[in-house]
Image: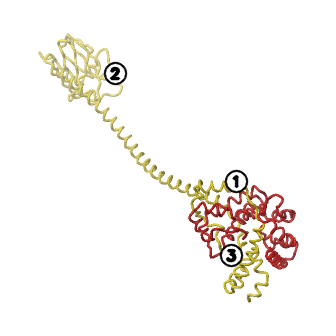
Amino acid sequence: MGTTLSYTEIELIQGLQARDEKLFSYLYDHYSPALYGVALKIVTDDASAGDVLQEVFIKIWKNIDRYDPSKGRLFTWMLNIARNTAIDSLRSKAHKLDQKVQDVTSANLMYEPQLAVHLSVDHLGLTKVIEGLPKDQRVIIDLAYFKGCTQEEIAKTLDIPLGTVKTRMRNAIMQLRILLKQL
Amino acid sequence: MDARFIISSGLIELYTAGLVSDIEGRELEAAMQQFPEVAEAVATCQRNLEEYVKLQSVSPPESIKIRLLNLINTDPLIQGTATTADNLQFTKTSPMEQTNVLSVPETKGVSWKWIAAAAAVLLIGSVILNFFYFNRWKEFREYKDKYQSLLLSQNSIISKTNEYKTRLEQLQESMQVMEDPKVMKVTMPGTASFPTAIATVFWNRDNQQVYLKVNNLPEPAADKQYQLWAIVDGKPVDMGVFEMGDTASLLQKMKITGKAQMFAVTLEKKGGAVSPTMEQMYVAGKIPG
C-alpha cells in the first residue's frame, strides 16, 4: 500500500460502522483511485466508471456492517465490490458473453495503461511492471481479474489449450511478484 | 496432497484470479486450514494481484466525491443499513470468487424492496378497508331494505289513515244528518218478493234533501243499479241511483223533493230508468203521518 494511513483498519471500520462521515471521506480519498482504476479497466469509459465508483462507495457505506475482518482485508473486500459492480454494469449494458469475449480479443488496446488520459497515482511503478510483464501474461491476468472470464473462455479467447491457462497464470503471477519486489 | 505440491501446482494462482471451480476452491480452502504455508501463499498471491491493481490507480473526478457526500447525507435509502443479502458478503477469501455472479445493483435492489414493501402495505391496507367497507355496505344494504319496507308500510299507514279519516268524516256527516231533528226517518221494509231487504230514507223537510241508507240489499249484477223513487201524489219521481259495496254502509245523498208520500227502491239497468220496474221493487216505505 503506497499510502500512509493515519487510521488503522480497525479504526476505519469502526468509524464507518458508526456512520462517521469524516472517515468515509478519508476512505474515499485513500481508496477511490485504486477502485476507479479497476472500474475503468472493466467498463473502459469515464462516465460509466464514475457511475460504478459512486455505486461502489454507496455499497461500502451501506454494507460496512457486513464486512467480516476475519475473512479478508478491507481493501480486498472493497476491491471485490468494485469488480463485481463494474462487471455487472458491463453485462447489464447488453454485453453478452460472446460480445465480452469479442471485445477482449479485438480490442487489445484496452489493456494498455491509460497514462495518456489519466494521471496515474504511481505511473513509474506501473510502467515498470507493464514493461516487465510479457503481454500474454498481462492479458491472462486482465482477462481473469478484470473481465471475470472463466478458464474455458480464456482458453478460447487466447486460442490455447485449457491446461495451459493454469501454467500461464502461475507464471504470470510469479513474474508479477518478482517485478513488484523490484519496485 | 502436501503443501509444497499445492503451492507449486498453480492452483493458488488460479484460485486467486477466480478461475477455479467450486469443488477445487473448497479443497484449497480446506488445505489453507490445514497448512499455514498454503494460507500464506494464497495471501501473498492475493497481495500481488492487489498491488498490481493499485498500480493502475487513476484519480477519479472530484465531482464524484461531492456527489457521494451529498448522497449519504440526503438519501434516506442510503443512510439506513441495507437489508438485502447480495453479493457483498464475503464467503471466501478469493477476490475473484463472485465475479461471475450476476447481481442486481444495490441501490436498485433496495429501492425495489422499498417499493415492494410499500405496495404490500398499501395492498394490506386496501384489503382491510375493502373488508370494512364491504361490511358497511352489507349493513347499509340491509338498512336500505328495511328502510324501503318501512317506507312502504308508512305509506300504507298514511293511506289507511286517510281512508279512515275520510270514512270518519263521512260517518260524522251521516251522524249529523241523522241527528238533525228536522230530518225525518222513513224505514222501507222489504216487499213480498224480497222480504229480507231493508233500507232507510232520511229526509230533511227544511231543505228537501233526501238521503238513503242501505240496511240490507243484495249486491246487484254488474250491469244493474238500484234506483230510489219518491211517490208524489201517486206518481213515481226519480230520486237517483245509488252505489252498493262499501258505499252502501254510508248515508248517500240523493235528489231533493219537497213532497212525497212514499219512498221505494227498484233494481234497474245501470244509470237508472225513467219509470220504475214494479216487479223489481225491493223495498218501499210510507211516510208516517
Mark 3 or mark 2, which is nearer the start of the sequence?
3
Q: Considering only vertical position in the picture, is B6 above or below A179?
A: below
State the CA–CA distance, disc 2 to disc 3.
Answer: 121 Å
Query: Which is closer to the viewer, label 1 or label 3?
Result: 1
Which chain has been coloured red in this picture?
A
Along the viewing direction, whichever of B60 and B155 lies nearer the viewer: B60
Q: Which mark is residue A155?
A: none
Residue at (67% x, 59% y) in the render? A55
Label 1 and label 2 in one chain: yes
Residue A178 seen in the figure: yes
User: Three-letter amino acid code at disc 2?
Assistant: Lys
| Label 1 SS | helix
Residue at (81% x, 71% y) in the render? A153
What is the crowding at mark 3: few (fewer than 14 residues within 10 Å), some, or many (at least 20)? many
Spot occupied by residue B26 in the image (x, y as percentages of width and height): 69, 80
Residue A139 seen in the figure: no
Q: Quadrant of residue B41?
A: bottom right
Q: Quadrant of residue B200?
A: top left
Along the viewing direction, whichever of B24 and A61 lies nearer the viewer: A61
Q: Which mark is residue B269?
A: 2
Residue at (33% x, 38% y) in the render? B153
Q: Which residue is mark 3?
A: B93
Label 1 and label 3 in one chain: yes
| Label 2 SS | strand
Q: Which residue is mark 1?
A: B63
Which chain has been coloured yellow in this picture?
B
Spot occupied by residue B60 in the image (x, y as percentages of width and height): 73, 58
What is the crowding at mark 2: few (fewer than 14 residues within 10 Å), some, or many (at least 20)? some
User: Three-letter amino acid code at disc 1?
Assistant: Ser
For the N terminus of chain A, the image quarter is bottom right
State the CA–CA distance, disc 1 to disc 3.
Answer: 33 Å
